[in-house]
């Protein structure tokens, strides 16, 4: 009989569990979503000795959005997700960028390897106009 794998990561909001007094955890798909979100937000030198881990979403917000910007981001996200998050298989990445505004919307379609249920993470970075 196969043993069910439970993903468990620290909750990076560092909330305290009121029952145990310990730092709360994220489990299952929430742990994976938190990890993917963090991968998208990595900046250069954030992980010592691993300067190639930078996706650079924040730094690219104010760059010219032409000449392969979307393709560069898509490839970079796929490579780093494969490298840093072995719990998932990336099915597709959609990057939408407005040329007139400094905003990027990234949608990652992925499948956790243990559950084989498809999931989506959508991430918005930029000025909110709502």
Image (cartoon, rainbow, N blue to C red):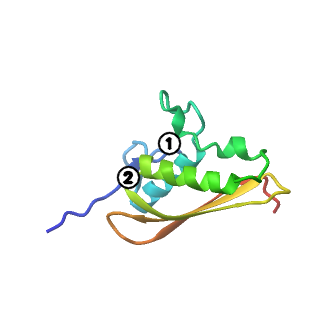
Between 114 and 14, the residue placed more toward the observer is 114
Residue depicted at x 57% and y 41%: 42
| Left or right position of 54 against 48 | right
In the image, residue 99 above or below residue 62: below
x%, y% of residue 113?
35, 63
Q: SS at mark 1?
A: loop
x%, y% of residue 60?
71, 44
In the image, residue 7 above or below residue 94: above
- Earlier in the chain: of badge 1 and badge 2, it is 1
* Mark number displayed over residue 62: none
Which quadrant of the structure image shows residue 63?
A: top right
Front of the two marks 1 and 2: 2
Residue depicted at x 40% and y 72%: 117
Neighbours of disc 1 within 10 Å: few (<14), some (14-19), many (20+): few
Residue extending furthest right?
100
x%, y% of residue 54?
57, 39
Q: On the image, numbered disc 2 is attached to which residue?
A: 86
Q: On the image, numbered disc 1 is attached to which residue?
A: 14
Image quarter of the N terminus: bottom left
| Left or right position of 11 against 60 | left
x%, y% of residue 116?
36, 70
Residue extending furthest front?
67
Is residue 89 visible from the viewing direction of this image? Answer: yes
Residue extending furthest left?
1
Q: SS at mark 2?
A: loop
Q: In this figure, what is the number of numbered marks? A: 2
| Left or right position of 12 against 125 | left
Residue extending furthest top?
49
């Amino acid at each position: 009989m196969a043993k069910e794998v439970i993903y468990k990561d620290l909750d990076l909001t560092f909330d305290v569990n009121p029952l145990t007094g310990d730092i709360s955890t994220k489990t299952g798909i929430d742990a994976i979503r938190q990890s993917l979100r963090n991968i998208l937000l990595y900046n250069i030198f954030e992980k010592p000795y691993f300067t190639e881990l930078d996706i650079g979403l924040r730094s690219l917000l104010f760059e010219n959005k032409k000449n392969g910007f979307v393709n560069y981001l898509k490839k970079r996200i796929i490579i780093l997700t494969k490298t840093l998050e072995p719990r998932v298989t990336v099915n597709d990445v959609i990057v939408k960028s407005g040329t007139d505004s400094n905003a990027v919307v990234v949608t990652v379609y992925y499948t956790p390897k243990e559950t084989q249920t498809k999931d989506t993470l959508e991430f918005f970075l930029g000025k909110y106009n709502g």
